[in-house]
Amino acid sequence: MLYHIFYPLAGNIKLFNIFRYLTFRTIYAMITALVVCFVLGPWIIRKLESLQARQVIRTDGPESHLQKQGTPTMGGVMILTAIVIPTLLWADLSNQYVWTALFITIGYGVIGFVDDYKKVVEKNTKGLSARQKMFWQVMLAGAVATFLFLKPGFSEELYFPFVKHFHPDLWLFFIPFAILVIVGASNAVNLTDGLDGLAIGPVAINAATYMLFAYIAGHATLSAYLQVPRVPGAGELAVMCGAMVGAGLGFLWYNSYPAEVFMGDVGSLSLGGTLGIIAVLTKQEILLVIVGGVFVVEALSVIFQVGSYKYRGKRIFRMAPIHHHFELKGVAEPKIIVRFWIITIILALVAISTLKMR
């Protein structure tokens, strides 16, 4: 919005020329997101408390979690607000990729909100069934994937880190592949959200990493020099990634151990879905497996645990997702959280290093 208001005035007032620069708008989207969290955060937490939107702790989980009972949840509303407002303020709203990403962010946020509201406000312990959530996630992701497949000029090629010349064209298989990336990322972040600040820290790091890749993908000279896929217009996604970083840091202010508020499904499903769609739009889907390695391991730990118990009658971990396994082994919660952040930073650096290893 600000871009469309002030940039046209640059011909008369040179100061407004700064609105043409993607880096400037990305930085201020990040700052705006932080301000939104700091200004609205306390009010949102009070509102959630008044609605009795409080976390219900599983009795079969780690005993240390029982003290979290009653902590406000659905704090993802704060995160979504802090992503959407700065994006609308600072991004070029004529860019279709921005609206595509916002569609997934808001759509998955609505799915999570309905599930959370039924569980914690209406006290319906079932909420949305797993089948219902999966159905709507697939439907939204499928709509976006189909739109991209039909969009002239959008490539269905698959790019691999460390590989220069192998770019298989997925053709029609691009649609199920994109659905898998978006839905998989959404649910992986959802599974990771089990400790104070555990999910939002890696989400912010992932968003910062994709902020760089979005900028490069949209820059003709840099993408050609680094031999990464050129996606005209994808640079504007850097603004949204910047807003995600700011929103993540702002939410972490309240979500750090011991948490004052949890994000709930409204936050985790939408954040994961957003990372997934940005990976698809920037043609860096495989890279998400690297930079989002913590999310991948968390999801795999659940899959392996369920599969092992179903077919062998034995558990691999003391409890899944894997962060609970470490808790039951006696590792302190803050130590698990910070170590997972450190691992994510290392993985992000590895992902960035692939820019020069092709």
Image: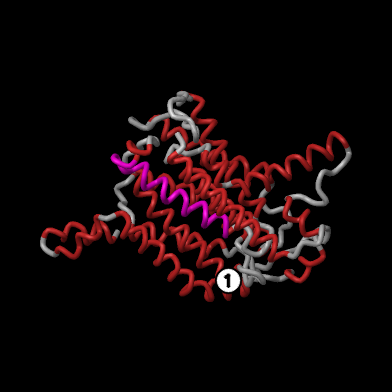
Q: Where is 175 relative to 266, above or below?
A: above
Residue 176 in the image: x percent, y percent? 54, 31
Q: Where is 126 relative to 147, above or below?
A: below
**Magenta part mainly helix, strand or loop?**
helix
Q: Quadrant of residue 165?
A: top left
Residue 84 in the image: x percent, y percent? 43, 58
Quarter of the rendering occupied by the N terminus = bottom left
Q: How many marks?
A: 1
Q: Is residue 142 magenta?
A: no
In the image, 35: left or right of 66? left
Magenta span:
201-222
Determine the residue located farthest toward the front in the rendered image: 357
Closer to us: 65 or 18: 18
Q: Residue at x 54, y 36 (%)?
A: 179
Q: Which secondary structure, mark 1?
A: helix
Determine the residue located farthest toward the right in the rendered image: 313
The amino acid on which the numbered mark 1 sits, given as a three-letter code, is Tyr
Q: Is residue 221 magenta?
A: yes
In the image, 284: left or right of 341? left
Q: Residue at x 48, y 69 (%)?
A: 37
Residue 121 in the image: x percent, y percent? 66, 64
Badge 1: how crowded within 10 Å, few (<14), some, or many (20+)? Answer: many
Q: Quadrant of residue 135?
A: top right
Q: Which residue is mark 1?
A: 254
Closer to us: 332 or 318: 332
In the image, 88: left or right of 314? left
Residue 106 in the image: x percent, y percent? 48, 52
